[in-house]
Image: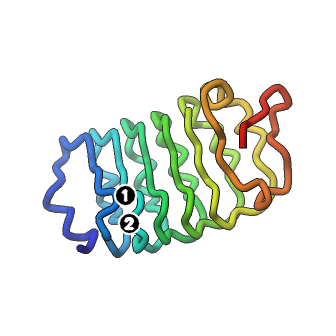
């Protein structure tokens, strides 16, 4: 099944788009970014979703869960994604994402779960990640620190890796 075939199934009032573990292939359509009521977007464990994360996902002001783990996404996390400030769960692990984690991650002040392991990130973790109160109190921050060249930037928090 191609991801393009899901477009007719969604309306502007859709609040959930869960298509995990369905052998979907192709790229994530930018048009998903206009679904203003979307709260959950889950394309996890499809393995063959390629391309980059659409910048338009940052326009999803009600999005609480974005789960794109276990695919073949590549490129950097678009800065626009950090405009989706309602995000509570961001799971991008097991892809081919690269680059540095933007300091804009600090905009996600409601974030409880951040999973970025099994990618190709480089550079230090931005200090802003240590300022996300909900992440420090409630989350296991899941990353392969071998891909990052610094320790967790908030000294009072010791993540359980």
Q: Position of residue 11 (x, y in %)?
A: 16, 49
Q: Residue at x 18, y 53 (%)?
A: 10
Q: Secondary structure at mark 2?
A: loop
> Residue beneath label 2, please?
46
Q: Nearer the viewer, mark 2 or mark 1?
A: 2
Q: Residues within 10 Å of mark 2 (few under 14, many from 20)?
A: some
Q: Residues within 10 Å of mark 1 (few under 14, many from 20)?
A: many
**For residue 9, side relative to residue 21 (left or right):** left
Q: Secondary structure at mark 1?
A: loop
Q: Position of residue 45 (x, y in %)?
A: 41, 61
Q: Dividing the picture into quarters, in which one does residue 104 lie?
A: top right
> Residue beneath label 1, please?
43
User: The C terminus appears in which quarter of the rendering?
Assistant: top right
Q: Dividing the picture into quarters, in which one does residue 132 lie?
A: top right
Q: Position of residue 27 (x, y in %)?
A: 37, 72
Q: Residue at x 60, y 64 (%)?
A: 76
Between the residue at mark 2 and the residue at mark 1, the CA separation in whole angstroms equals: 7 Å
Q: Nearer the viewer, residue 26 or 55?
A: 26
Q: Position of residue 113 (x, y in %)?
A: 56, 38
Image marks 2 and 1: residues in contact by CB distance under 8 Å: yes
Q: Residue at x 59, y 48 (%)?
A: 115
């Amino acid at each position: 099944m191609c991801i393009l075939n899901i477009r007719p199934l969604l309306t502007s009032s859709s609040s959930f788009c869960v298509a995990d573990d369905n052998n979907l292939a192709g790229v994530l359509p930018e048009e998903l970014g206009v679904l203003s009521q979307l709260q959950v977007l889950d394309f996890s464990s499809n393995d063959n979703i390629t391309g980059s994360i659409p910048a338009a996902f940052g326009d999803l002001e009600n999005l609480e869960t974005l789960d794109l783990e276990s695919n073949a996404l590549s490129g950097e996390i678009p800065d626009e994604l950090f405009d989706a400030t309602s995000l509570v769960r961001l799971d991008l692990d097991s892809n081919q994402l690269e680059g540095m984690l933007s300091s804009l991650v600090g905009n996600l002040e409601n974030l409880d779960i951040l999973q970025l392991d099994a990618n190709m990130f480089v550079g230090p973790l931005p200090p802003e990640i240590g300022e996300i109160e909900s992440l420090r109190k409630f989350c296991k921050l899941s990353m392969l620190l071998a891909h990052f060249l610094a320790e967790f930037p908030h000294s009072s928090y010791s993540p359980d890796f």
